[in-house]
Image (tube, rainbow, N blue to C red):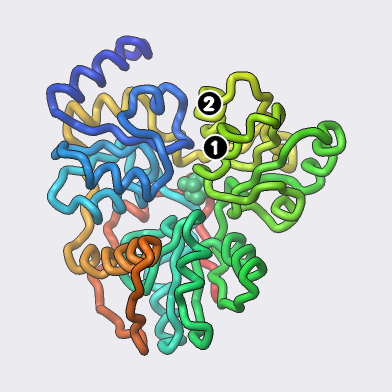
Amino acid sequence: MNNPHELRDEILKLKAQRQALILAHYYEDAAIQDLADHVGDSLALAQWGARSQNQIVLLAGVTFMAESVKLLSPDKTVLAPDLNAGCSLVENSPYEKVLAWRLRNPQALMVTYVNSSAHVKAITDVCVTSSNAEKVLAAIPRDREILFGPDQNLGRYLMKKLNRPMQLWAGNCDVHLLFSARRLEQLRARHPEARVLAHPECDEGILRQSDVVGSTSRLLQEVRENRGVRKFIVATELGIFHQMRLARPDAELIQSPPEGSCACAECPYMKLNTLEKLRNSLRDLAPQVDVPPEVAQHARQSLDRMMRITDGESVRWPERFEDPKLPAEPPYRAERGLIPRFAPEV
Ligand code: SF4
């Protein structure tokens, strides 16, 4: 049964039978967003999962997001429709290499973007999102050295904005790297009245030309609330256009063009999720995402520190890094490979 309407009905029936919660990331296809209980960015999805009464949570997003749901809801069954839904930032930052970086800099504090594996979060002092990174970094004493990863564009943007030096891990989101500064310049010349919105994972050449730099939620908020503007050029993944159109049917939305001949920038990992895979996952209660308890315990500390800082609490920082000697990463990471793997040396 592959008719989208029939699939949708089947998913909703299974969801009711299983009493499952469906969470979808902004970059999923519109058909998946439309049947989700909540649509949001990765931390918000994990927090919705934790707040709900449902014992089964299906996450339509990428695997590190499903891991985050599991970290905040360890007793729940967390389903991820396709375990090959990786992320270039995760692929660029394998645990063993990040651990070696930390061991070479034991006196430094490590700040990690939530777009990272549970293993990397587990050797991190504090996580950040693109929304709260400035507040979290401001809570770190000025005399502490900082290792920041895995997204170097976000790190570079924050260093400049906060005038704070950091060692950066050389990872990238391969989707946000696609946008072309040259073509954006041409587009702005054709649409001078448009407001330019960009995600901080984009290259500096894009960020320099943008009126608003922020998380996916922040960019959506700008479209929803800035009623005086009727035209937006948006440098982020195409999936968010669905919520932007729902919020502002009167506005014209133009995706910032990528370099080369392709017309739009879409995340190939997010797009691995399909209605059929969602149906199969709810029907078979598989694949499930799990995080080894020792890894989860350490990773939760870095998320917890982030949430306490964003709630205005003060936190204590370790003097030195101690290797927690974690078990090896789960094998499903090695099965991914839509985007060529590389592990930058820092
Ligand atoms: S858009 Fe980029 S950061 Fe987000 S999941 Fe895809 S590859 Fe990872």
Q: Secondary structure at mark 2?
A: helix
Q: Residue at x 19, y 31 (%)?
A: 20
Residue 29 spot, x, y in % from top left = 46, 28
Dividing the image into 4 quarters, which one contains the N terminus? top left
Q: Is residue 339 above or below residue 143?
A: above
Q: Is residue 108 above or below residue 228?
A: below
- Asked which quadrant contains residue 108, the reply is bottom left
Kind of residue at disc 1: Leu
Could you tell whether 187 is left or right of 232 in the image? Answer: right
Q: Residue at x 23, y 63 (%)?
A: 296
Residue 26 spot, x, y in % from top left = 46, 36
Crowdedness near tag 2: few (<14), some (14–19) or many (≥20) residues, C-alpha within 10 Å:
some
Q: Residue at x 77, y 48 (%)?
A: 181
Residue 224 spot, x, y in % from top left = 56, 32
User: CB atoms at circles 1 and 2 under 8 Å apart?
Assistant: yes
Q: Residue at x 85, y 32 (%)?
A: 190
- Asked which quadrant contains residue 106, the reply is bottom left
Crowdedness near tag 1: few (<14), some (14–19) or many (≥20) residues, C-alpha within 10 Å:
many
Kind of residue at disc 2: Ala
Q: Which residue is mark 2?
A: 247
**Residue 204: assigned label:** none
Residue 91 visible within the image: no
Q: Secondary structure at mark 1?
A: helix
Could you tell whether 142 is left or right of 82 in the image? Answer: right
Q: Which residue is mark 1?
A: 220
Q: Report how many numbered discs are placed on residues in the image.
A: 2
